[in-house]
Image: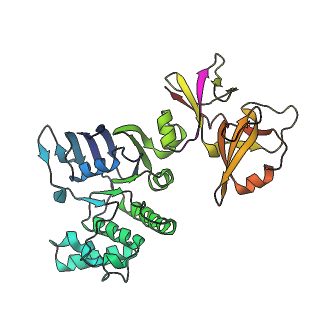
Amino acid sequence: MLSGWRGDMALDVQIEKKLPDFELNVSFSASEAPLSILGPSGAGKTMLLRCIAGLEQPGRGRVLLNGRVLFDSDQRIRVPARERRIGMVFQHYALFPHRTVAENIAFGLLDRSREEQAARLSSLITRTHLEGLSERYPEALSGGEQQRTALARALAIDPEALLLDEPLSSLDTHLRSQVEAQLQETFAAYRRPTLLVTHNIEEAYRLGEQLLVLSRGKVAAFGPKEEVFRRPPTREVGQLTGCKNFSRARMNADGTVEALDWNCRLRVEQTISKPAAFLGIRAHHIDFLESMPVGAPSENVLPCWLVRTSETPFRITLYLSFHQPAAETSAYDLQAEVFKEKWQRFRSLPYPWHARLSPDSLFLMPE
């Protein structure tokens, strides 16, 4: 671990800022667990980071880092960006083209002694796997090497918080995997407030421990990632976190739920405080019975027919019609995702297939 890194840090954010199409109005706290900020393009994610870093000024609000006030509109406090001790990795790296890797990393250390500069530079180059690249200029680096240089430069000042804006978006698949591994290694050692902006659902889940979902400048969901993914509070959050299957819902007197778009009655383990308006299930949570014994319980088991498929190297997406074969390929009720190994086991079974929507995998959402 680099000297000076320690836990028990906190970033408290409450800001408002008018934007051309909506108002950014966000309130949350982050500690040493990495926080992924997920949302569509134009949701206000980058502006939020820039306000925290001091590159933009909110209209109102307060930003505290480890109890130190960085911005307070009521007290008219605005600490300049260079004094906030926040490291930021920009989406397109923003490296100085006329400086070498070593000079880029050491840019924030010019007020330190030569000995301290050399020690931190050596430590960061090793930690970010940039050995042998110190004297190269950015144009001679791969995308992954540029990203690691930008990360090392952000860490050089020993920041009290780290902000990353779409750090993997400009990389191809191979480099993205390498840099993602680097980020996981860095986050494990850093253990200070870390905010990572992304619009990629899988990235957000793999890299963050906490998840904040942003929609048109507002916090749509915030909490442990497993909780937000497993029980999205609204249909919008379900969609933004990758759920593809929704039905209008109506509660029955016996506690079951009528899935109006799927034309079936289902048992759901979850209860919510508000009236349920929608029911959802993630595509990979749908199971298929490879045999249906006579007299077997039929709870949450639906007869289905395959409408069409699409595939990736490892998974198959099945578009299914409930109750009867579909008249056209666009008329399907639900999407299921299965690994190809399982697909091979039941693809030749006679119709109807039997899909099971487990009660603990279904979730309810209010209007």
Q: Tell me if 17 is positioned left or right of 277 in this view.
A: left
In the rendered view, would you say 335 is above or below 344? above
Q: Which residues are magenta?
A: 242-251
Q: How many numbered badges does the structure rendering display? A: 0
Nearer the observer, 335 or 88: 335
Residue 197 x, y percent position in the rendering? 38, 52
Q: Tell me if 335 is positioned left or right of 13 in this view.
A: right
* Residue 8 visible from this viewpoint: yes
User: Looking at the image, which residue is at 13% across and 45% down?
Assistant: 77
Q: How is the image coloured?
A: rainbow
Residue 131 x, y percent position in the rendering? 38, 81
In the rendered view, would you say 210 is above or below 253? below
Residue 235 x, y percent position in the rendering? 50, 34
User: Looking at the image, which residue is at 81% across and 38% down?
Assistant: 352
Query: Outermost residue toward the front?
Result: 328
Nearer the observer, 266 or 314: 314
Residue 89 x, y percent position in the rendering? 32, 61
Query: Outermost residue toward the right?
Result: 294
* Residue 66 visible from this viewpoint: no
Q: Tell me if 320 is positioned left or right of 224 in this view.
A: right
In the rendered view, would you say 102 is above or below 27? below
In the rendered view, would you say 92 is above or below 267? below
User: Looking at the image, which residue is at 21% across and 53% down?
Assistant: 55
Q: Say which quadrant the N terminus sits in.
A: bottom left
Q: Tell me if 169 is positioned left or right of 192 in this view.
A: right
Query: Outermost residue toward the left?
Result: 76
- Dominant secondary-structure state across the stretch colored magenta: strand
Q: Is residue 168 magenta?
A: no
